[in-house]
Image (cartoon, rainbow, N blue to C red):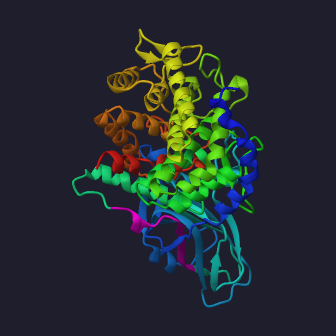
Amino acid sequence: MPVSKSIFNGAREQVLAQRKSWVETAQASIPPLYEKEYAPVALVSAVRDSKGFQGWRMDKAGTPADYYQQVRKEGDSAILDFGTHLVGTLRLSFSDNGRHIDAPVKLRLVLGEMPAEVGEDVLLPCDTKLSRSWYQEEIVHVDVIPGVFELPRRYAFRYLRIDVLTVSGYSGEFRIDGVTCKAVTSGDEAAVAALPSSLSQELKDIDAVALRTLRNCMQTVLEDGPKRDRRLWLGDFYLQAQANHASFRNNQLIKRCLYLLGGLCSEQGIAATNCYENPEPAGSGLCALDYVALYIPTLRDYCEASGDWESARELWPLILVQIEKLLSVVDADGIFRDPEGKGIWVFVDWHTKLNKEVSFLGILIFALEAAAELADRLGEKTASAFFTGEAERLRGAARKHLFDSAAGLFISGPDRQISWSSQAWMVLSKTVTGAEAQAVMRRAMDLPSAIRPAGPYLYHYIVEALFRCGLRDEAEKLICNYWGDMVRRGADCFWEVYDPADDFLSPYNSHQLNSYCHAWSCTPTYFIRNYLV
């Protein structure tokens, strides 16, 4: 075995020996949650409107006080608007009308992040493998009135629909005379620096929504979405960590997530792609190889932001195992081909037609660069030289086998597909730089037939590539056109998926099950604070 490859010897065994202690470190790093109580700000009506997002708009119908003063009867339905997106627990106060209630009151509560979720009477039929239990609907029986009813489950919502299903026919009159939400987050708003007054109002508005998105996903881990899936995903985590370093600076939370994903690795020593917190920390068994690659720059960025290089030293064997695994899927030419055919899951984007071969190769080179930087800092000279050499080898392979000189673009897969993603990852991996990098980005984005991103996750990397190659104006314009359009369409937080041409786009065939506060959409605050101020 070449000396350089000997760096991997024994790394897996070290990882398996340490993973239990890494989970213990994660559990010792659970951050405190900040609590704040919110009350509704308006009584609203959901009105069908073809011009509204997903065919709905909200009209003001009164004040919360108007609702609290009215006696509730069977068949009543009302929607309370909390004015902003919240993550927390719900509390309702009840009073009688001078007589004891002789039977339980049965209510249906529907909590929605968007008007469509509470405007529709039910979860619409859909062909989906995603569990319908993510639909935030509760049927509750209130036995004691007057009294207070607290729902134990945490919700993510702005709107609360209350339907009165059943009351006693003898003494069933009652009032709901108070509703509050105890919102929770591990993001300290006081830690976020104010933006300069010279920044445009549009960018300030985008930043505010991005911060709210990140803050509401900041719980005892960085959740992908507080409505769904409510757990830590590695790909989302990388983007959240970047945004966190530019805003809330909660290093404790980042450390906890790094140690969880490392400690919950597979028997092969591969970092968990996602994980569960309760009842005990556990990995899901899924493995998205592009997410695995992003563990490495996430660790590097954390160490640079926090100064905690001891964690880099402790997790170093894990980095070695990830690199060894990532390099194992590259062929003799230095190319990554047909991941699905090899039983390898690579995500990159939701787009069903996107060929991911070039994108993943770029992600691998990107990870090798981060690994080399970690190795340099830790004094691992042999590893650093090997990682740097492998990155150069793969860049050469990409230019030799994947670059179409006639088109001036990188092509991916047997059908020679051109996509924004392929060009962006070749820029981010430094396979092309300077004027050449600018040219491939402009050519792809001007080409009508090029495959565009299907969601905010990939749009992040397009914007990052534009900034990295010096196309600042184009990057800012894309932020304002894409994320800014969500703001203009009523977003309190940024959404899991968004296509300006399709309000109902859903990877799950149900817009009601989409997440409308989603981690991978929060990065405008990173761009604004790192590149535009």
- On screen, residue 10 versus residue 35, left or right, reads right
Residue 372 shows in this picture: yes
- On screen, residue 445 versus residue 293, left or right, reads left
The residue positioned 52% from the left and 65% from the top of the image is: 186
Q: Position of residue 520 (x, y in %)?
A: 51, 46
The answer to whether residue 96 is above or below residue 369 is below
The residue positioned 41% from the left and 46% from the top of the image is: 486
Considering every residue shown, the one lying at the far top of the view is 406
Q: Position of residue 71 (x, y in %)?
A: 56, 79
The answer to whether residue 425 is above or below residue 258 is above
- In-front residue for pair 5/353: 5
- In-front residue for pair 18/184: 18
Q: Quadrant of residue 381?
A: top right
Considering every residue shown, the one lying at the far left of the view is 198
Q: Position of residue 70 (x, y in %)?
A: 52, 78
- On screen, residue 442 versus residue 382, left or right, reads left
Q: Is residue 188 magenta?
A: yes
All told, the count of numbered labels is 0
Q: Position of residue 266 (x, y in %)?
A: 74, 44
The residue positioned 43% from the left and 17% from the top of the image is: 409
Q: Is residue 53 magenta?
A: no
- On screen, residue 251 versus residue 154, left or right, reads left
Considering every residue shown, the one lying at the far bottom of the view is 98
- In-front residue for pair 417/24: 24
Residue 504 shows in this picture: no
The answer to whether residue 338 is above or below residue 183 is above
The residue positioned 36% from the left and 45% from the top of the image is: 484
- In-front residue for pair 450/180: 450
- The quarter of the rendered structure image containing the N terminus is top right
Q: Which span of residues is magenta-colored?
A: 176-193
